[in-house]
Image (cartoon, rainbow, N blue to C red):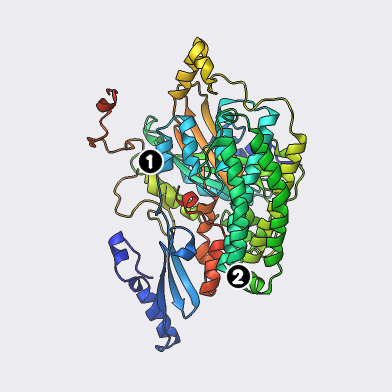
Amino acid sequence: MALTAEKIVERLESQFEGSVANFRYEIDQILSFDVVASKNFEVMKFLKEDSELRFNFLTDVCGVHYPDFPEGEKFAVVYHMHNWIDNVRIRFKCFLNGTNPEIDSVVDLFVGANWQERETYDFYGIKFKGHPQLKRILNMDEMTVFPLRKEYPMEDMNRTDKDDRFFGRVK
Amino acid sequence: MNKIIETSEDLLINPEIRYSEKIKKFQKEEGDDREFSVLNLGPSHPATHGIFQNVLLMDGERVIEGESTVGYIHRAFEKIAENRPFYQINTLTDRLNYCSSPINNMGWWMTVEKALGIEIPKRVQYMRVIVMELARIADHIICNSVLGVDTGALTGFLYVFQYRERIYEIYEEICGARLTTNMGRIGGFERDWSETAWKKLDQFLEEFPKVWAEFEGMLSRNRIFMDRTVGAGPIGAVRAMEYGFTGPNLRAAGIDYDVRIATPYSSYEDFDFKVPVGKTGDCYDRFCVRNAEIWESLSIIRQALEKMPKEGGFHADVPEYYLPPKEDVYNNMEALIYHFKIVMGEVPVRVGEVYHAVEGGNGELGFYLITDGSRTPYRLHFRRPCFIYYQAYTEIIKGSLFSDALITMASMNIIAGELDA
């Protein structure tokens, strides 16, 4: 029997009461939910190894910055998983605090998360505890900022050759 | 532990330093007379077909271990995308896997259409399928013929490249561009395909199969080619899955996962095609899987042409998102307003999240889009298949000969643009 959304919700809620919440469908009709950040490894392990859920493939790991959210939810790490046996996708988000965003690495479950976590660290400064080699991957090593955070403007604000006033735009 | 490079100044130091302690350890274990060398492969080396650096510790011709450095053509597309209206992001997707840009373009439009809730007419969906399969053929032509070059067969490469040129001519008829195509609009294509485009497509379908059969005949049972590729750079199915492999590289390892079947988009469910799989995941299997996929793609194009509805136009009827014809803009107020709003990016956008994946030339190309109702994405993440499977490269080549390491890289079809985004 195919894996239904009700089944996923039921299995997760019975196993992780209080740690998983806010089950919803986003526009793309993928079942999404939030996980308490400290439980991300256990939840993923359960999703992967449970004999009914069998989410055997980690599709994607990425970060999001929400500067307008309350202090405990400034950053999110989003995981997309895919069950190839029943062909079901899910997505879960772990919210992190803004001062010291830290979360457990899932490299021990899916070795492919290695570079994706490094990329997330590179762009958002989210630390993955237990990662074998957490250093920058796409940006140069001397970089001191985490460029995908919303507080960094895309272009250098001090550039004089790209002054908006010259193009009839006034800020 | 070898010394970890902290800053790029360290990279200017002789790369031997990186492995000096490891070398000492090996020499202690196996005797001082063992000689090791450190080879700096890349970042700019003709055999790597792109800009990647691998520092390899070598024992004679054998690779003991390696360390990859990527990011040499990183262009911060995800940051740029947060500052551009939706229709301008299409040009960024061109530059991901530039060997099959139309797949990226169509993938992006489908993501936006999903987010906006736009229904696409069947005819447009079939046209998209045709152009995506053409792009897949072009992508696989490059990968397989370049694998031929790396094993010493240059002629086949030059021969089949003429047919990639034919595909580019079809792109040119459809959208005006060749490599970075920027094809399509939200809701469909920018114009209907010309007579010449259809004619060129028919001509391609007639001529290419013969040529490809010749190319396949030259390499697939060729003694020299098989000696080089069979058993080179293998990866098992379970390991490939853990590493997040998708696309031909995963299928070569024996798993029949294909986004076109798993989560069909653009009416792929209407077509009948096989998903070729390999067994050992080595270079030869990857070559064979790509070859077989070309035949399947040709069959999909033929089916699409056969089933193509006469009616349906070349775009969906969505005036809020699709630019009106220019003469209407000049003569009609409604059209002028729409034109202005679309160009300024001020179109209505739903709030929410969308993940949409297409089967790119290299595997599952995913777009994860978060919208907050404004003119630009709040967050856009590209799931680039190359980036995810290239991390397995140093593990795959461990213990293999250097010559095998090079053809492994060629057969994995690593595209720097997609890798670095």
Residue B379, horizontal then vertical, whole percent: 45, 35
Amino acid at pointer 2: Ala
Chain letter behind tag 1: A
Which residue is under mark 1? A148
Amino acid at pointer 1: Leu
Quarter placement of the N terminus of chain A? top right
Residue B88, horizontal then vertical, whole percent: 46, 33
Residue A19 seen: no
Location of residue B34 by image quarter = bottom left
B35 vs A105, nearest the viewer: B35
Q: Is residue B272 left or right of residue A124?
A: right
Q: Residues within 10 Å of mark 2 (few under 14, many from 20)?
A: many
Q: Is residue B61 left or right of residue B308?
A: left
Q: Nearer the viewer, mark 1 or mark 2?
A: 2
Secondary structure under tag 1 reads loop
Decide: is A19 above or below B40.
above
Residue B43, horizontal then vertical, whole percent: 40, 62
Q: Is residue B362 left or right of residue B329?
A: right
Label at residue B232:
2
Decide: is B299 above or below B44.
above
Residue A30, horizontal then vertical, whole percent: 61, 35
Same chain assignment for discs 1 and 2: no
